[in-house]
Image: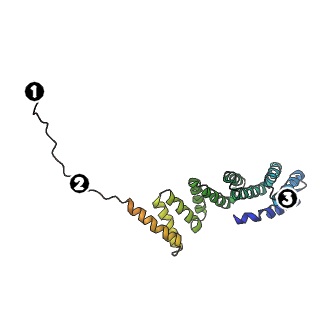
Amino acid sequence: MASLALCGSQVCEAAKKQSGEGNKKSPEANKLAVEGAEAAKKQEFDKAVDLFKKAAAIDHKYSDELSAVYQQRAYAAAKDQKYGDAINDYEEALKLTPQQAPRIREQRAAVEMKIQDYDKALADYSELIKEKPNEIKYLSYRAYIYELKNDLQNSMADNEKILKADLNNQDAKARKQRLEQKLAERVTITPPPRTPTAAPTASTKGKKKP
């Protein structure tokens, strides 16, 4: 998440560059984008989003800057524990710039973990692992989620990948011990077969004859 701290200056520079390249084609969009970048620099994210939305509506090339501002606002919202707002902004950013999906998904998954929305976090980490199947950080988070969900086999599978890449990973070694214990507890002891007993016969004692 620290990488997003640089976004303010990057958005500002990008908007100015876009303005210099295309001010003859869409002067109004360029003006809005520069104002939006200045607002982002001051961390006035609501204003920045509004301005960049207007700029992108006129000229689609500003969608990248709008996505960056959504990510900045999401980061700020997460710091303020406004997790729902943060997730919504990351989703908007993802729609605008799907090519940035790995970074956005990682940021969103971190928020989902904060609010214990493990199903959505699991989906995001699974997508990230498709992109980087040997990334220990993603495998660790997914193994952790699987363990919480009591999906021991999948947790163990991810954990083994971690240990294969880093034999001395302490978290993975501790998780392996826990998982092995839980799996052992799941093994049920089959009771010996019961010896069949004869069915009781009906007693006629005390019955009257018809």
Q: Secondary structure at mark 2?
A: loop
Kindly identify the amino acid type of the residue bearing the numbered disc 1.
Lys
Of all residues, the one furthest to the top in this rendering is 210
Quadrant that contains the C terminus: top left
Q: Position of residue 126 (x, y in %)?
A: 57, 59
Q: Which mark sits nearer the N-terminus, 2 or 1? A: 2
Kindly identify the amino acid type of the residue bearing the numbered disc 2.
Pro
Q: Secondary structure at mark 3?
A: helix
Q: Position of residue 153 (x, y in %)?
A: 45, 61
Residue topped by disc 3: 38
| 63 relative to 206, above or below | below
| Residue 145 seen from this side | yes
Residue topped by disc 2: 193
Crowding near pointer 3: few (<14 within 10 Å), some, many (20+)? Answer: many
Q: Which mark sits nearer the N-terminus, 1 or 3? A: 3
Q: Position of residue 142 (x, y in %)?
A: 55, 61
Q: Position of residue 160 (x, y in %)?
A: 49, 68
Using the rendered view, name the quadrant where residue 37 is placed.
Answer: bottom right
Q: CA distance from mark 2 to mark 1?
A: 41 Å
Q: CA distance from mark 1 to mark 3?
A: 105 Å
Specify whether 170 is left or right of 10.
left
Residue topped by disc 1: 208
Of all residues, the one furthest to the bottom in this rendering is 168
Q: CA distance from mark 3 to mark 2?
A: 79 Å
Whether residues under marks 3 and 2 lie with C-beta atoms below 8 angstroms apart, the answer is no
Residue 196 — which label? none
Kindly identify the amino acid type of the residue bearing the numbered disc 3.
Glu
Q: Which mark sits nearer the N-terminus, 3 or 2? A: 3
